[in-house]
Image: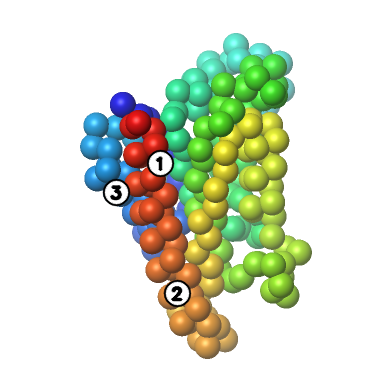
Amino acid sequence: MATLLHLDSAVFPQGSASRDVTAAFVEAWREQHPDGEVVYRDLAAEPLPHLDASAVVAGAEDALRAELAAELASADAVLIGAPMYNFSIPSTLKAWLDQVIIVGHNAGPDSPVAGTPVTVVASRGGSYAPGTPREEFEFVQNYLEKVLTGMLGAEVDFIVPELTLAHSKPEMAELIPLADASRAKAFTDAAKKAKSLAVRLAG
């Protein structure tokens, strides 16, 4: 029985593109793998404390950090909802990363997380894709890819619903067809990825 660790970090419980896509992922996962376990953390509803000096010194001896690290290590797959806020990830997600990554315990070449598939739903109001005017402002995928692979050795894949503000901002009205296409692709990609992972892990 495979375990999926699911993290959401969008501040709004409804109307969030990242939450909608991660929910579709989980639905497809459960359909394909009904006996699997889903461990869920809503980092916006129940934020973790920021890392402090005592927790750094304690490392894996800190109760909360040990709990989070064990939760991550026991997951066969990880799903992260990571909307772009001010060109970066939500502070609640950064707090989780700071707490869960423990040098000398799970960070490094012998990390127990090495090879774990991590799917990140990186939603954003505009577009920061290569070749766009704001390409250089993309710090969500760049950061998460480096920290998850470089420190934990995870296998990271991104699903990117973009232009999510097109329906609410008149100046982006002409981008609505592209926004709708991006959203549809994100749902399709989420379902495909969830099913393929469920089959792979069940085998």
- In the structure shown, which secondary structural element does the residue marked by tag 3 occupy? helix
Residue in the image at 63% along x and 32% along y: 153
Give the mark, 3 or 2, whose residue is nearer the N terminus.
Answer: 3
How much space separates mark 1 and mark 2, taking CA atoms? Answer: 24 Å
Residue in the image at 64% along x and 53% along y: 140
Left or right position of 29 against 76: left
Near mark 3 (Cα within 10 A), the count class, few <14, some 14-19 or many ≥20, is: some
How much space separates mark 3 and mark 2, taking CA atoms? Answer: 21 Å
Q: Which mark is residue 27?
A: 3
The quarter holding residue 42 reads top left
Report the amino acid beneath label 2.
Ala
Q: Which residue is mark 2?
A: 181
* Disc 1 versus disc 2: nearer the observer: 1
Q: Which residue is mark 1?
A: 197
Residue extending farthest to the top is 61
Quarter of the image for the C terminus: give it: top left
Residue in the image at 52% along x and 40% along y: 118
Q: Is residue 119 above or below residue 115?
A: below
Report the amino acid beneath label 3.
Glu
Report the amino acid beneath label 1.
Leu
- In the structure shown, which secondary structural element does the residue marked by tag 2 occupy? helix
| Residue 84 seen from this side | yes
How much space separates mark 3 and mark 1, taking CA atoms? Answer: 13 Å
Q: Is residue 59 above or below residue 24?
A: above
